[in-house]
Each structure stands twice: as C-alpha cells, then as structure tokens.
Amino acid sequence: MRAIEITQPGKPEVLQMCERPMPELKAGEVLIKVHAAGINRPDVFQRQGNYPVPPGASDLPGLEVAGEIVDGDLEGSGFVKGDMVCALVQGGGYAEYCAAPVAQCLPVPKGFSMVEAASLPETFYTVWTNVFDRARLSEGETLLVQGGTSGIGVTAIQLATALGHRVFATAGSDDKCRACEELGAERGINYRDEDFVAVVKELTSGRGVDVVLDMVAGDYVAREIDCLADDGRIALIALLGGAKANVDLGQVLRRRLSISGSTLRPRPVAFKGAIARNLRERVWPLLEAGKVKPVIYKVFPLEEAAAAHTLMESSTHVGKIVLQVV
C-alpha cells in the first residue's frame, strides 16, 4: 500500500511517500480502506521527534481516518464489512489502509462526506473526554476555549454551545475572533491585544468561568487561575506555551480549584471505546441534525502531506486540514 512515512525527525519535507506492507490485524481490530485522514497537531510533534509512538502502534503518522471496513474482527460490534466508518487510531492514518480497534470506530454521520467524517474523531474524542468527563462541564456552567480556531477549538465551541453553555474563546486575530463567534462563542478574545482575564471577568460580572480548555499551558496557567470561578477547573491538553508554570496555590486551596491534564493516544482501547459510546449517543445526533458541523479549512492529496503540515504549522487555518486518500 502507499503511505506517508517520517524519514527522520525534521521539517515537513521529511514526510515522504513510500510503499509499506498491509497492516497486520490484532484481535478486536478491523482493516479500513482509507478514503481520508485528518491532520492534527500531534502529527507535527511526532514528525519533529517530540511525540513518541506508543509501543505496538504504527510508526506512520495519522490519528484519525474515515473509510470502508474491508476485513477484521467484527463480532459483537454491530458493524459489517462494507460499512463506512470513521475511527480514532494510535497511528497509521496517512496510508491507503489502516488498522483500527473496532471499539474506536463510529458510523459516518448521515449526509457527511468522507473528508468531513475524517475530521471528527481526534477532536471530538479529545473535547468530550476533557471538557465533559474530566472537567465535568455541567448545566449552567461557562467554558473558555484557548485557541478557538484550532481543530480542537472549533469542536469545543460548537459542542458546548449546542449543549447550552456560554462559551468564550481566544484567537490571534480579529478575523479569527469573528470566526469563533460565528461558530457559537459569545465573545472571541484577541489575545494579542486584549487581556482574556479582564474580558472574562467583565463578561461574567466578576465571577469567572467554570472550565478552561487549555492547549497553551506555560504562563497562561496562572492567568487562567485568575479568571476561574470558585470550584473552577482547568483541563490541559497540550503545552504549546511551555511545560513550566508559576501558579498561586493559595488560590487553588482557598477557591477549591482543579488543574488536570491528559493525553489520549496512550490510553487503552476500553477507555476510548467508552468515549465512542458517549459520542454516538450524545454527539452524533447533534451532527446529523446540523447543530454541530465539521469545519474543513483545506484538503490535500495524500502525496502532499508535507504541504499540509506546513499549513498546520503556520496556524493561519480555521478548523481542520484533511488528506484525501481515495
């Protein structure tokens, strides 16, 4: 099969087309003929040598795919050969065929193209487990999304809004802030010339937000503590601003604040399968009703994966970047 491999750690041009053997399936896995594969920031980190591949996972990049089930262990899954699915995988998505745990497969939502379906798994799994499971965003609570126009950001804004929450989001330009608002955010905050703490406090009459979804970390964490309501929670999912932070632990104690972090890739199949069941029950109906929509910025053919990574690193996009395989 054709695939894109990382020839060595480095810049986008280290992504090269190659021929690889077909994936070998394990118990509980299916073989997907890939039609499209989503691109995510962890793919960039892996290409740079900063995101180790979990033991037993493919060394090929790519954490989400959409395509046709052509073989595998389907017992008890409700799927049959020929079904069109999208799936979260530990790697191997940048290829014509990909192995996926059947528990991590979801049906392509009705009316969705394969490109749209390929843009769903990584961001929806991540947002659901961090915002709704770990940070327990509950009825009547507010959410601040850092990086509102990223793939994660556009998903978090839309999903929380569709579920009835007030949402604020940061972005790096006025145009991107307007894009956040068009997706459902009550207010886009331009972090280059506005203090998101002051804006959040003003918008919440001094109370602060209940949950912050943070992919920046670094010196943002101390400021996020300042803009949390009592009993507020910060969910860390990336460290784009650095892995070190100086925080006022007195506030954490006095105001019963929580800071948690997680990475999804190394978690076991059973954990991800539970997220898939929640998504199918709670989120897929919102997608099929048009209340939450995929935001596709640009589609590249598989052989132009390097150009797709260059765009990802530019951070000029709003939403998802996808590789078309078929």
Image (spheres, rainbow, N blue to C red):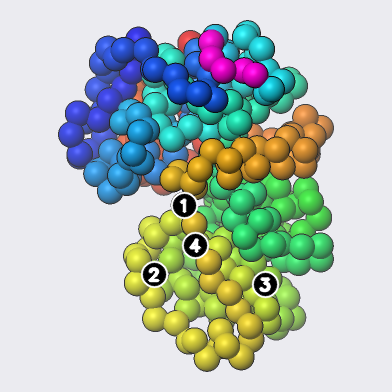
Tell me the distance, in whole angstroms, between the alpha carbons under discs 1 and 4.
Answer: 7 Å
Mark toward the start of the polypeptide (1 vs 2): 2
> Quick one: SS at disc 1?
loop
Q: Nearer the viewer, residue 126 or 286?
A: 126
**Mark drawn on residue 218:** 2
Q: Is residue 215 above or below residue 307?
A: below
Q: Is residue 18 left or right of residue 177?
A: left
Mark toward the start of the polypeptide (2 vs 3): 3
Taking the magenta stretch, the answer to whether it contains residue 73 is yes
**Mark drawn on residue 209:** 3
Kind of residue indicated by mark 3: Val
**Boundaries of the magenta span:** 71-75
Number of other residues with Cα within 10 Å of mark 3, as a class: few under 14, some 14 to 19, many 20 or more? many
In which quadrant is the N terminus drawn? top left
Where is mark 1, residue-wise? Answer: 263
Mark toward the start of the polypeptide (3 vs 1): 3
Q: Nearer the viewer, residue 202 or 303?
A: 303
Q: Position of residue 147 (x, y in %)?
A: 51, 55
Of circles 3 and 1, which is in front?
A: 1
**Mark drawn on residue 261:** 4
Residue 71 in view, yes or no:
yes
Tell me the distance, in whole angstroms, between the alpha carbons under discs 3 and 1.
Answer: 23 Å
